Amino acid sequence: MSTRESHPILWTESLTRKFGGLTAVGDVNLSVSSGELLGLIGPNGAGKTTLFNLLMGLTTPTSGEVYLEGKKISGLKPHQICRLGMVKTFQNVALFPEMSVLENVLTGGLLRASVEEATALAKDSLAKVGMLEIANKKAADLTFPEKALVEMARALCTKPKVVLLDEVMAALNETEMDHILRLIKTLRDQEGITFIVIEHHMRAIMNLCERIVVLSFGQVIAEGTPLEIGANPEVISAYLGTDTTSGDLH
Amino acid sequence: MNTQPIQKYCPLALFILLCSIPWLLTDQGYAIRVLTLLLLFAAMAQSWNIVGGLANQISLGHAAFFGIGAYASTILLIRFNLSPWLGILVAMILAGLTGGLLSLPTMKLRGHYFALATLAFGEVMRAIANTWSSVTGGPVGISVPFSPNAGLGMMQFKSTIPYYFMMLAALTITTFIFWKISHSKLGYELRAVKANVDSAEVIGIDTTRTKIIASVISAALMGACGVLYAQFNFFFDPDSAFSLVGISIRVALICIIGGIGTVFGPLIGACFLLPLEEIFNAFLSGKGAGYSQLAYGVILIGIILLEPRGLTTLFKQAVQRIKA
Amino acid sequence: MSFLQAILDGLMLGGVYAVISIGLTLVFGVVSIVNFAQAEFLMLGMYVAYFVWRYLGLDPILGSLISFAAVFVLGFFVQQFLIRRVLKAPEVAQIFLTVGILICLENLALIFFGSEYRSVQTSYQNEALEFLGLIISMPYLIAFIASGIAGGFIWWVLTKTWWGRAVRATAQNPMAAKLMGINTDQMYRIAFGLGVGLTAFGGAIILPYLTVSPSVGGQFGVLMFTVVVLGGLGNVLGAVVGGIAVGVIQSLSGLFLPIQLQNIALFIIFIATLAFRPEGLLRKSL
């Protein structure tokens, strides 16, 4: 089902995570090329966020391995994985509520820089996502879409090679979504960052991603270009009868 | 973190004020002794503030580090005639090490459980000090040997004024350390860890290391304060050096009332709480043991029932009403 | 002292620790608050039994019932007027409220009863049974039996009576309990009263072999929390298992370790459980 592409930056081998009797992620072999824009879709409960947690070290695999740039990272702690170049955002957004927007974002830059340098980096990052005007607002006071963008800015401050975005566009309107789509493409084009994106907005995924992996009940049931996926009967049936925020598969 | 002119010069003015006070008071008198202890407790609260304010872990066992410091330095003084200035170094190392070791199993504990674990640790240290008579002298306590010719070198003074300045120095140093940490990488990391551990980890913060470092610094500073107390008071016993109410709770309370996590909180809290205690003592201890502490407990309960959302909220509201 | 003797002593002590700690775990399980003042209610129970013995001549084992009743009522009102106000407050407030209660109770005892140590004289204090070469101290044995009866009674109340089931329902899901018509505030009052009352009862039955003073709570505080953490906070059966375990561990460690290290041994167990298995050794819950 999966062929290892040339220069894969991230790949997994039979990655599995069980919770008691439930297999949240089962025997997943994923391979991501450097600079790829990969979409990860599937009905709710398919195991997408769990897969992200496994990649990021927030959950340890029951079996299987994860490799980043050839180095085995399964079993490492999240901060070590971040140091190696991967970062993740959270589905329900996990900012530091009592800190300001700027402070939140600069904390992401402290990995490799001093406070002053990180502050400059943070301003830059915020400008990219379009949130610079609210830099001094308290994070708890932001709207949900603002929070998602700030979290993305914070993730970018860690100077990552691979970014895992978990439904960052969930609450965005069309304009905001277009902006982010363009931002992601620019970051990939100019800085070579690899993106794996979990989204329920099909239009966004189809628009952005070069390749899509479909997860259902923890297993990869399909993999291919947006056109291939849109026409795949298994994918369609996996979605029928379940709730998705946008039923549009084309 | 805007630094308006008034915020820059206030601390300096305050410092100058604090430096001039002792000269206005009767030496070795009641007032200067109270103020000296007030400064020491503010320093202790500031040490606690590093863990309680920045990492938001409510420790109810900081007396453990205080007592370790006091005993370590004094025992070395008695047995080897080691100057307390060196004793402070030993105390800080021992206390810091203990703090670091304790933080390992307690790190993941939240709220009540952390308070519980630290409280238990403080009590265990007290029990050990009480029973390990060969080393600590047991329940009767230890007296710091008084030598009439000793002076700065042995941290012993006849006049109270040098002690006052020692405590002032302690407060200044601990406050400076607290301020430096809050504005440094460590400060940001601690606040991130306090807010959301997973989120902090994912952006590269070694949350374990961060918590350990904060614990070690806080414990070491507390240990140093223990040495200062021993040298000032010339006597302590397990029940006072490792006291739950007299030290652990008091220090936490001072910091919380004054404003947990703020730079001046500990001093404000000490200025509020300690004179209050003295007033109670003056009026009530004549009646017998227990009255002043009872009043303490009642006030504590009263404050919490008045403003369950937080003692600092109550204080801020009161301050705002006074300003208006 | 032989190994078996130490185990036997530990078992009997453990039974008492169990009863004392069931109260604490009950409070946590139902009211969801860590009561830092719990050991002070033990002290109160001891004093009640002492004065009942001194002025009414009642043996502490009977006095323990009065201790239970008196402290139950006290706990009822403490819950209503104090604890209830901080149930939704930040943890700092909850911690310091029960700490404030701790300070008040201990100093009230100091003011009213003085700091002297007091003890009772009972007919059986110095008696002992001999059984298979082992010595069973009478006060230990009687306390153990009383604990067993009390434990069994609580078990019966919690599982077979309507009140008990209502209390358990409130512990598991207060919202659902309310919807079923249970007055959860009343359940909290009963649970807290029951919890501190039981601990007071436990204090009373050990009076024959201990002395009481205002600071006696300090001896039992860490111990109670160790038992409860071992058994799982909120788990009544766990408190029994934990109590026995702590009793035996304490007794055995007395054989090998000097007293200073016994304290450490207990504390290490406490910390290790909190760190590695915070849900306790057992799996079930209340």
Image (cartoon, rainbow, N blue to C red):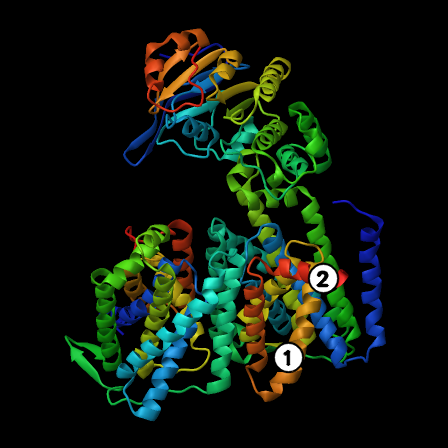
**Measured from the top left, where is residue C42 in percent x and y?**
38, 74
Circle 1 is placed at which residue position? B280
Mark 1 surroundings within 10 Å by alpha-carbon count, few (fewer than 14), some (14 through 19), many (20 or more): some
**Measured from the top left, where is residue C167 in percent x and y?**
31, 60
Q: Quadrant of the C terminus of chain A?
A: top left
C183 to the left or right of A207? left
The answer to whether residue A238 is visible is yes
* Foreground residue among C87 and C261: C87
**Measured from the top left, where is residue B183 in percent x and y?**
70, 45
Q: Amino acid at mark 1?
A: Phe
User: In the rendered structure, the residue with mark 2 lies on which chain?
Assistant: B
What's the CA distance linking mark 1 and mark 2? 25 Å
> Looking at this rendering, what residue extends furthest in the left direction?
C132
Which residue lies at the image location 43% right of the left edge and 29% below the top edge?
A: A49
Which residue lies at the image location 62% right of the left edge and 50% below the top edge?
A: B54
**Measured from the top left, where is residue C27 in percent x and y?**
37, 63
Element under label 1? Answer: helix
A119 to the left or right of B70? right
User: In the rendered structure, the residue with mark 1 lies on which chain?
Assistant: B
The label shown at residue B50 is none
Element under label 2? Answer: helix
Circle 2 is placed at which residue position? B321
* Foreground residue among C143 and B90: C143
Give the quadrant of residue B275.
bottom right
Comparing marks 1 and 2, which lies closer to the viewer?
2
Which residue lies at the image location 64% right of the left edge and 64% below the top edge?
A: B254
Which residue lies at the image location 61% right of the left edge and 84% below the top edge?
A: B285
